[in-house]
Image: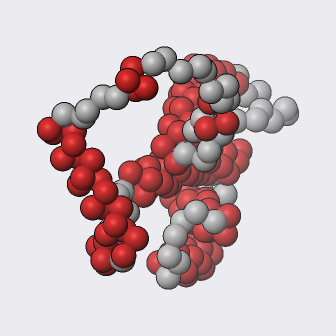
Amino acid sequence: MVRKNNLNSYNLKLENEQSRIILAVIIILVIVLLFRKSLYSIFERIIIFAILFLLFLVLTKNLIITTVGSILIFLLINFNIKYTKMIENFQSATEEPAIDFGIFQEPNVKKSSDGIQELLTKINGGIELKEEDKKETSPLNIDSKQYSDDNKPNALKAAQKEAYELIDTVSALKDTITTLAPVLAEGKKLMSIFENLKI
């Protein structure tokens, strides 16, 4: 008699005592997670995956369903964590820095402020043009590229780049799931056919 592989062959028989031990481990892992400040390190992600795997194992008692289910849910949680981190980075990049108004009381700043006020007064009343101001000057031959902001680190650009990479990852994940869904459905049909053809 040839034994055909099917989804049921991966079922586990868990005793009540084993199920209680797994549930106790899940509770301990959840408590460990609650006392962590962030979910960005590898250690926290391993704990999350272990919790998902053990929960699926207790609920389904099937290794294939447990593995596939825990990986898919973990990818969704990981996506959510990356998205949250990206939003936090974007918000911190767009927050305005606190202004220290005490700096305006320093003598050099006060002198500069008075100079600006005097300049604004001249602008409002009109500036007297001299003859030399009307003459066109020669180019200064200054390379403006060295003053460009393109090479300076910019949190907004980094957040936008991360957003595009995240969108590409989600799109790839969606395509993978869309591609695998019919294959899994056909595999299930084949397994049921093999099950019916058992000799």
Judge whether 99 appears above or below 91 on screen.
Answer: below
Task: Identify the image quadrant of the N terminus.
Answer: top right
State the image coordinates of residue 24 (x, y, percent, origin top left).
55, 80
Residue for point 42% across, 58% down: 92
State the image coordinates of residue 36 (x, y, percent, origin top left).
53, 78
Identify which residue, 4 or 153, lies in the foreground: 153
Identify which residue, 149 or 82, lies in the foreground: 149
Q: Quadrant of residue 191?
A: top right
Task: Identify the image quadrant of the C terminus.
Answer: top right
Give the colour scheme of this rendering: secondary structure
Judge whether 63 appears above or below 140 on screen.
Answer: below
Judge whether 179 appears above or below 157 on screen.
Answer: above
Q: Quadrant of residue 46?
A: bottom right
Q: Residue furthest front?
A: 131
In the image, taking residue 151 as reference, residue 104 lies left or right, namely left
Identify which residue, 48 or 17, lies in the foreground: 48
The answer to whether any part of residue 43 appears in the image is yes
State the image coordinates of residue 154 (x, y, percent, origin top left).
55, 45
Tally of marks: 0
The answer to whether any part of residue 196 appears in the image is no
Identify which residue, 89 or 27, lies in the foreground: 89
State the image coordinates of residue 64 (x, y, percent, origin top left).
66, 45
Q: Residue furthest left?
A: 125
Q: Residue furthest right?
A: 1
Residue for point 34% across, 66% down: 111
In the image, taking residue 35 as reference, residue 105 lies left or right, namely left
Residue for point 24% across, 34% down: 127
Judge whether 88 appears above or below 183 on screen.
Answer: below
Residue for point 36% across, 57% down: 95
